Amino acid sequence: MTDRLFTLVAGLALATALTFAPHAGCAAGTVGSGAPQTANTPRTGTLGGLWRSVKAREDELAAVIGRRDLAKVHERAFALRDLVVAMPARSAALTPGERAKLENHVTYVRTLAARLGAAGDAKGQGATETAFRQLRAVLTAIEALYPPAALAE
């Protein structure tokens, strides 16, 4: 019960902070279909370039968690989230069903980034590792939506 209460309070605090205090480095514009433009969201480029950035951020996050440097998890998780949020705007070639799956995965990545941030801020190594495993599974599911050539551009 205490863990669920902590997660709820941490999630509400994070949502409030993100709603009323824009992330450092946010630009005033938007990308493509209206996704927020932040310092971590590429303004131009291919879907393949965006995916390479996602995978690089995933590797950085894995290294930070592996070193138990939990103070850096929040920043890395939200940078990765911002990149994933930009993917639907570059995914016009997907079928409507695939786009719906992508949107669901993007929503879950947002949730997992918040969980990672909260767990890292709380110095919870176990919770951080669990959320990261879930994030990796979602990224694998996102990758499976695309033909291999689409992400290799």
Image (cartoon, helix red, strand yellow):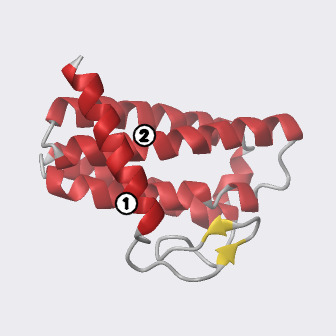
Mark positioned earlier in the residue sequence (2 or 1): 1
Question: Crowdedness of circle 2 by 10 Å Cα count: few (<14), some, many (20+)?
Answer: many
Image quarter (top left, top right, bottom left or bottom right) of the C terminus: bottom right
Place residue 107 in its image quadrant.
top right
* Position above or below: 76 against 107: below
State the residue at coordinates (85%, 52%): 93
x and y, in percent, of residue 88 in the image: 71, 54
The span from disc 2 to disc 1 (Cα, nearest Å) is 17 Å
- The residue that mark 2 highlights is 112
Q: Which amino acid type is shown beneath numbered disc 1?
A: Ala
Residue at position x 12%, y 43% in the image: 123
Instruction: Give, as a three-letter code, the residue at label 2.
Output: Leu
Q: Nearer the viewer, residue 92 or 26?
A: 26
Q: Position of residue 134 (x, y in %)?
A: 42, 31
Q: Secondary structure at mark 2?
A: helix
Q: Is residue 79 visible?
A: no
Nearest the viewer among 16 and 32 is 16
Front-most of 98 and 85? 85
Q: Which residue is mark 1?
A: 17
Q: Within the image, what quadrant is residue 87 found in?
A: bottom right
| In the displayed structure image, the side of residue 127 where residue 94 appears, left or right | right
Left of 90 or right of it: where is 6? left
Name the image quarter holding residue 35. bottom right
